Amino acid sequence: MLVNSFLHHLNTSDVRGILTHLKSLLTEDGHIHMLELVLPEEPSIARLLAHWDRGKFARPLEEWRSLFEGLFVPVVLNPIG
């Protein structure tokens, strides 16, 4: 399964609901690949651009980590920035 740049458009409750549903669809050996906007913590051009994105729910890395690890065992968590 692939979730690509979608979840930062949803509030936290909706994200948890979607992730919970996706987990229920996985086989034992299944994986979900997620690419998502990470809100930079420090003031920067990258942070400004993240805020200008149409998604209203850009989250810092630790918040994403908490959401994902609450339901899944990460195989790779590779923030790029």
Image (spheres, rainbow, N blue to C red):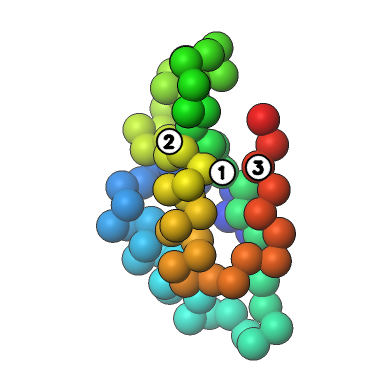
Q: Mark 3 points at which residue?
A: 79
Residue 51 location, quadrant: top left
Furthest residue to the top? 45
Looking at marks 2 and 1 on the same chain, the residue that comes earlier in the sequence is marked by 1
- Image quarter where the C terminus lies is top right
Structural distance between the alpha carbons of marks 2 and 1: 9 Å
Circles 2 and 3 in contact, beta carbons < 8 Å: no
In what element is the residue under mark 1?
loop
Question: Is residue 3 something that shows in the picture?
Answer: yes
Q: Mark 1 points at which residue?
A: 36
Q: Which residue is drawn at 43% across and 39% down?
A: 59
The spot of residue 73 in percent (x, y) is 59, 72
Give amino acid for label 1.
Answer: Glu
Label 1 Cα crowd, 10 Å radius (few <14 / some 14-19 / many 20+): some
Q: Is residue 60 above or below residue 28?
A: above
Seen in the image, is 24 located left or right of residue 3?
Answer: left
